[in-house]
Image (tube, helix red, strand yellow):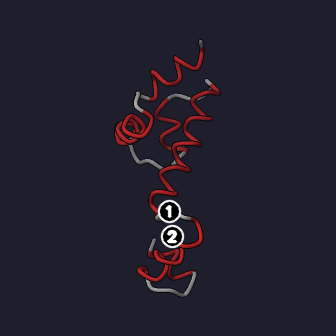
Amino acid sequence: MAELAKAAALSRSSFFVRFREAVGVAPMVYLLTWRMALAKNLLRGKSMAVAEVAERVGYRSASAFSVAFSLYVGQSPAWYAAEEDV
C-alpha cells in the first residue's frame, strides 16, 4: 500500500481514505476479493496445481494461500477444484 500511496502522491492514510471512498471497501479487502476471484477461476480451469495458483495470485506459499482461501470460500482450494468437476 505504501507504494500505491507514493505513486498517488498521498500519505498512506489519505490513500486509504480516498480508495475506500472511491471503491467502497478498504484496499486490502479489495485485494483479497480480487485474489480469491482469480484463484477460483484458475482452480476451475483444472490446469494448475494449488501451489501454482497460490503463486499466480500473489501468495508466497501454498499453505498461506490455502488458509486464506479456506477462510474466504469456506472450503480448501483442493475441495473447491474437485467440487467444480461435478
- Name the amino acid, label 2: Arg
Q: Dot 2 corresponds to which residue?
A: 20
Question: Whole-percent x and y of residue 54?
Answer: 48, 40
Residue at image location 53% in from the left, 74% down from the top: 4
**Does residue 17 lie above or below 44 as drawn?**
below
**Which image quadrant: the C terminus?**
top right
Residue furthest out toward the top: 86
Callout 1–callout 2 Cβ contact below 8 Å: yes
Q: Position of residue 12 (x, y in %)?
A: 43, 80
- Say whether residue 42 is left or right of residue 78: right
Residue 81 drawn at (x, y percent): 53, 23
Residue 48 to residue 68: above or below: above
Residue at x 46% of width, y 57% of height:
29
The alpha-carbon separation of the residues under discs 1 and 2 comes to 5 Å
Work out whether 45 lies above or below 16. Answer: above
Question: Where 75 falls versus 8 (above or below)?
Answer: above
Residue at x 46%, y 74% (from the top left corner): 16
Determine the residue positioned at 41% across, 48% down.
60
Residue type at mark 1?
Val
**What is the tally of numbered marks visible in this picture?**
2
Q: Badge 1 is on which residue?
A: 25
Query: Which quadrant of the structure image shows residue 28?
Result: bottom left
